[in-house]
Amino acid sequence: MTSSQNIPGPKSGILGIGNALEFQKDQLNFLMTAVHDFPEDIVHWKFGPMYDVYLLVHPDYIHELLVKQWRTTIKWQRFTNIVAKTGPKNLVIVEGDEWKQFRKMSTPAFHTQRIKNYIDLMVKHTEQLVGDWEDGAVYEMIEQMTQVTMGIIGEILFDIPDIEKDAGELAEALMVILDMFMLEVTALMPVPDWVPTPRNLKENRAMQYVDDYLMKIIDERRASGEDRGDVLSALLQVVDEDDGTGFTDREVRDILLGLFTAGHETTMKWLAWAMYLLARHPDIQEQLYEEVSGVMSGDTPDLEELDTMTFTDRVLQETLRLYPPAWSLFMREATEEMQLGEHTFQKGAILYISPWVVQRDPRWWENPQDFNPARFEGDWKKQRPAYSYLPFGGGPRVCIGGHLADMEAEVILATIVKNFKIELSEPNQIVEPEARFTIHPEGGMHLKVVKR
């Protein structure tokens, strides 16, 4: 065994201060430069004077951490403390036996049959979206996809058919909260919450708005006792098999906040990047149009038609490879001395996984910068190491809503491509990625739609 301290990596600045500042400035460039300059299976750097960070580059190490040794780590305490400000029982941060209980009790809300029942909601909101589009108009696709995905997740979670009316305020509040996560996680010295800075005051207002919004819905549903077939009803009714207890209202609120945020933010960014890639590759877009127009009997797909649209699946998978919304699976902290492969890591070591890095590794993905849905033809998983592709995470803590997101993205993209051609808003348009909580298009995502 060798000490993890001997693993090479960036050595910028006194006590790692330079690394922390460079990482905060441009996370994606920092990570890709690190793996380029230090072509190792693990890259080490100091993040300020307190933390040793180890980026796991090889899929075998990622698999070992997430599947075999996930019990020897917890989410990095700095991140956990930040998320806890929005809700201490968020599924993202609960650990150990409490996480297992919460996950088990939440799973019925995402059973396959329940998800299948949601397809009509997806179709309805997507029809509303494309029905309002004008031929030849340029739209900011982050705004457009926020509207449709928030409408869908609002009805799936809360049975609210017109949550779009609140989409502007809700989306703004959630964006403030998500930006808070990234700013405070990457800061060398986070500003204490009690300091009345403009940003702290803005964050507090956003969290209070979201809290009031969700608790009002939960209070009204608890009082009525009505089962509307949505996720909220499932969470309010579920009972632990061992002790007969259910979720408290605050626990339901924390779980719903995590699901609501992930349920629209990640899918919205996924779809926006898919449309950008299709606009830049009109030949692939036409191949996709040929599939959806040949399979779909109407303007929107039904469940059976979704099952046959294999090229649509490949387009979406390749989009997730290039622009995984969850570009960083954040950092896990060793709770005891542990081994990964030949390396020994001390308690407190920060183990870091980034799908952005591993899914652009030329060892597993030929010409990794190219958009090529054909990578996912056939039994593609046998051609690469497990965990060389992990847009929804992996191991026991894989995303609980991954299947729901797949179906939603397929319904929306197929409907758009069946009815509209997507074009760049200007010749040679380039949209640069920006690392926020998810991969965000710097300057927005302006695309032109042409009625077919």
Image: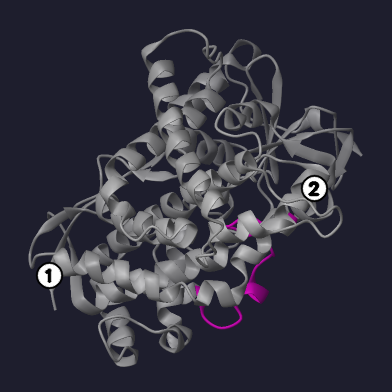
The alpha-carbon separation of the residues under discs 2 and 1 comes to 48 Å
Inspect this view and state whether residue 124 appears: yes
Look at the image and say whether residue 387 sits in the magenta stretch.
Answer: yes
Q: Helix or strand or loop: what does disc 1 sit on?
A: strand
Quarter of the image for residue 174 reads top left
Look at the image and say whether residue 10 sits in the magenta stretch.
Answer: no
- The residue indicated by pointer 2 is 70
Q: Residue at x 35, y 62 (%)?
A: 274
Q: Residue at x 8, y 68 (%)?
A: 135
- Tag 1: residue type? Val
Q: How many marks?
A: 2
Residue 77 in percent (x, y) is at 70, 28
* Labels 2 and 1 touching (C-beta < 8 A): no
Residue 226 in percent (x, y) is at 53, 61
Task: Provide the residue span drawn in magenta.
Answer: 376-396
Residue nearest the observer in this picture, 226 or 149: 226
Q: Residue at x 45, y 52 (%)?
A: 266
The disc at residue 450 is: 1
In the rendered structure, the answer to whether residue 314 lies left or right of residue 190 reads: left
Q: Helix or strand or loop: what does disc 2 sit on?
A: helix
Q: Residues within 10 Å of mark 1 (few under 14, many from 20)?
A: some
Residue 352 in percent (x, y) is at 66, 39
Residue 240 in percent (x, y) is at 78, 56
- Tag 2: residue type? Trp
